[in-house]
Image (tube, rainbow, N blue to C red):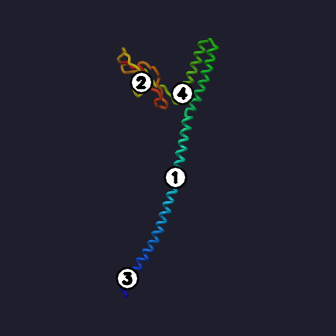
Amino acid sequence: MEENEMTQQEEQVPVENSENEATETLSETEQLKLEVEEHKAKFIRLYAEFDNFKRRNAKERVELIQTAGRDVLQSMLEVMDDCDRAEKQMQTSDDLQQIKQGIGLVFTKFRNTLQAKGVKEMKSIGEEFNPDFHEAITEIPVNDPGMKGKVVDEVEKGYTLNEKIIRYSKVVVGK
């Protein structure tokens, strides 16, 4: 009988351990479920925040695009006012020298305004032809061998905006 009792005691111990393990496993499972729920809630909040960020960023980008040139256009309106005054002056004045001087001042103000906004004229005449900066309209024969492959004439000036080309120079190249 003692053997029988021993066997029962040994069997009971594992049963009790397995119940304890089951209890621990249930509590671990519950803990894991709670952690999963917590992480899920954090993920949902993070996703919502990111979605709001994307919407806000898209809205700001649209507003920026719509008003990007506002500062430049306001500056150009001042030059336009000067052009209107010059036009009135041309209609009422017969002094050609005064009209030339007034128009020269308007052009100077226009160039200075563009320059203040980061627009710069590209120098082309006499430079080596470079397709990264120039657009060749035509080639003409030149007498000076030093001018072969160089820009002889400029049909349209090229411009850069903050060191990026916004219009290529249209040029005539010597051959």
Say above or below: 67 vs 129.
below
Q: CA distance from mark 4 to mark 1?
A: 45 Å
**Pointer 2 or 1: first along the chain:** 1
**Pointer 4 or 1: first along the chain:** 1
Q: Are marks 3 and 1 in contact (CB under 8 Å)?
A: no
Q: Which residue appears at 41% of the width and 79% of the height?
A: 13
Residue to which mark 3 is pinned: 7
Q: Are marks 4 and 1 in contact (CB under 8 Å)?
A: no
Q: Are marks 2 and 4 in contact (CB under 8 Å)?
A: no
Q: CA distance from mark 2 to mark 3?
A: 100 Å
- Percent position (x, y) of residue 21? 44, 72
Amino acid carrying label 3: it is: Thr
Q: CA distance from mark 2 to mark 1?
A: 51 Å
Q: Which residue appears at 51% of the width and 56% of the height?
A: 42
Q: Nearer the viewer, mark 4 or mark 3?
A: 3
Q: Are marks 2 and 1 in contact (CB under 8 Å)?
A: no
Residue 64 occupies quadrant: top right
Residue to which mark 4 is pinned: 114
Say above or below: 122 vs 93.
below
Residue to which mark 2 is pinned: 135
Label 1 environment density (alpha carbons within 10 Å; few <14, some 14–19, many ≥20): few
Say above or below: 29 vs 39.
below
Amino acid carrying label 4: it is: Leu
Residue to which mark 1 is pinned: 46
